[in-house]
Image: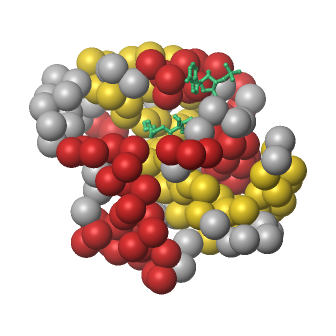
Amino acid sequence: MHTLVIGKYSCQIRPVRRTDILKIFEIEKRVFGDDKFDIILLRDLVQQSIQFVILEEETSGEMLGFCITMQINPQDLRGSNHHSAPQLPTTHIVNIAIDMPYQHHGLGKFLLQYCLDEMKKLGYQKVQLEVNTANWQAISLYKQFGFQQGEFLANYYRSGANAYRMEKLLQEN
Ligand SMILES: CC(C)(COP(=O)(O)OP(=O)(O)OC[C@H]1O[C@@H](n2cnc3c(N)ncnc32)[C@H](O)[C@@H]1OP(=O)(O)O)[C@@H](O)C(=O)NCCC(=O)NCCS
């Protein structure tokens, strides 16, 4: 278990459990609105992700946020702009969220750093993600961590919102 005191929060990161799904869905609804993941997808991700972790308050057990990462298969990279680049072992941050009341206290940074460190330990050399072009808080977080803004993806989200693909080489950290 990875623990750290951040401001007034004594936090720990642990692997997801199937019983967490409803709480995760509640956070999804609050932070992503129309672009939330549904419960079936969240259940599938518990099975398929390489890392699905929960950030919680140590004493109360309150869920503060979560992060989901998946492997990208080399064949999936071929269709994108990456066909000319060497295909490094790549991981994908499918979703990262800190619940509304706990945002802007440094928890997102803590969770993202943990996930990047874990991906590096697992041997991944590159990480990708997509972010809503209007989500400047998240874009600013990713840029702070050295992510480069890449491809523009029109109508990427269910709501019709656009996205940027962003990526980072993990050995740069
Ligand atoms: C994006 C998110 C994960 C960041 O987590 P957080 O705990 O709120 O962020 P932190 O307090 O750790 O701040 C980290 C950095 O994010 C950026 N940031 C976050 N909130 C910000 C705000 N209100 N204004 C400006 N920058 C902000 C800044 O770069 C900040 O670094 P700084 O404090 O050194 O300026 C969180 O706000 C969230 O869950 N948002 C909704 C879901 C989402 O958008 N997820 C990303 C999907 S791609």
The quadrant holding residue 169 is top right
Q: Is residue 132 above or below residue 62?
A: above
Horizontally, residue 28 falls left or right of residue 11, namely left
Q: Quadrant of ligand 1?
A: top right
Q: Position of residue 37 (x, y in %)?
A: 29, 56
Horizontally, residue 75 falls left or right of residue 92, namely left
Q: Position of residue 148 (x, y in %)?
A: 51, 18
Tell me the residue at 72%/71% (across/down): 60
* Residue furthest right as drawn: 5
Tell me the residue at 52%/49% (across/down): 99
Q: Nearer the viewer, residue 97 or 115?
A: 97
Q: Is residue 142 above or below residue 38?
A: above
Q: Is residue 120 above or below residue 172?
A: below
Assign the C terminus to one quadrant of the image: top right
Decide if residue 171 is in sight here.
yes
Decide if residue 84 is in sight here.
no
Q: Is residue 6 above or below residue 144?
A: below
Q: Position of residue 154 (x, y in %)?
A: 16, 23
Q: Nearer the viewer, residue 57 or 49?
A: 57
Q: Nearer the viewer, residue 38 or 91?
A: 38
Q: Nearer the viewer, residue 44 or 72?
A: 44
Q: Position of residue 59 (x, y in %)?
A: 79, 71
Assign the N terminus to one quadrant of the image: bottom right
Q: How many marks?
A: 0
Tell me the residue at 59%/39% (across/down): 103
Tell me the residue at 20%/33% (across/down): 156
